[in-house]
Amino acid sequence: MPFPDDLLEQAFHLASRERTRPRQASLRRAVSTAYYALFHLLTSDAASNWKRTEQRDQLARVFDHGRMKNACSRKASELINQLKKDRPTGETLHRATKLLLVAETFSGLQQRRHSADYDNSVNWTRGDTLAEIRTVERAFEAWRDVRNQSDAQALLVAFFGGREPAR
């Protein structure tokens, strides 16, 4: 099982660890772990495009969370505008909504991960935590459906900080 899948499994484990009265530490770590599962899913796919296999692990370490969030926010805005303007159908609609789910999940979850890690005024519930993890699980499925599409690959390139090329 690849590392991102292990992290997602670990997030579910942490969220369900205590049968009654879950600890904030478990719930917060579960949210954070779910975020990192998606982060590693995307960065490992980006690095897998690198020709030199011996350098892929090094390459995966250069990704910046803020740049990735910004790229996902831009992609989500672009997709929302495209869906409103073009009203695509069929496979085009399917791909756009899947990529939108990935982009929105990443950018939104990054903020919630930050809250889980640093904002002690927020009280997490098991239900909220499991909802976050399930959203990541859906994003995993969506990404695996679209990862080889040109828009998805362009998003991976945008993680390096540049703008996606105009189509």
Image (tube, rainbow, N blue to C red):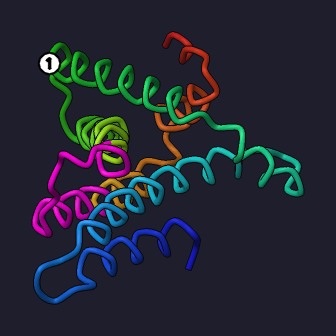
How packed is label 1: few (under 14 Cα within 10 Å), some, or many (20 or more)?
A: few
Residue 29 point in image, percent of width and height: 37, 64
For residue 53, above or below residue 158: below
Q: Secondary structure at mark 1?
A: helix
Q: Is residue 121 covered in magenta?
A: yes
Residue that sits furthest to the front in the current view: 120
Residue assigned mark 1: 84
- Type of secondary structure dominating the magenta stretch: helix
Residue 18 horizontal/vertical position (percent): 22, 86
Residue at 20% in and 62% down: 129
Say whether residue 93 is magenta: no
Q: Amino acid at mark 1?
A: Lys
The reply, left or right, for residue 163 in relation to residue 82 is right
> Which is nearer the eye, 158 or 69?
69
Position of residue 34 in the picture relative to residue 151 (left or right): left
Q: Quadrant of residue 133?
A: bottom left
Please state the extent of the stretch shown in magenta in the rendering.
115-137
Return the x and y of residue 96 as percentages of the image width and height: 30, 35
Using residue 135 as the reference point, say whether residue 53 is left or right of it: right
Q: Quadrant of residue 136?
A: bottom left
Q: Residue 105 at x, y = what percent? A: 30, 44
For the N terminus, the image quarter is bottom right
Image height check: is 139 above or below 29? above
Q: In this orientation, does residue 91 appear?
A: no
Q: Is residue 148 visible?
A: yes
Residue at the image position 33 percent from the left and 53 percent from the top: 139
Which residue does the image show at 49% across and 41% down from the upper left?
Answer: 149
At 44% from the left and 23% from the top, the residue drawn is 70
99, above or below 132, in the image: above
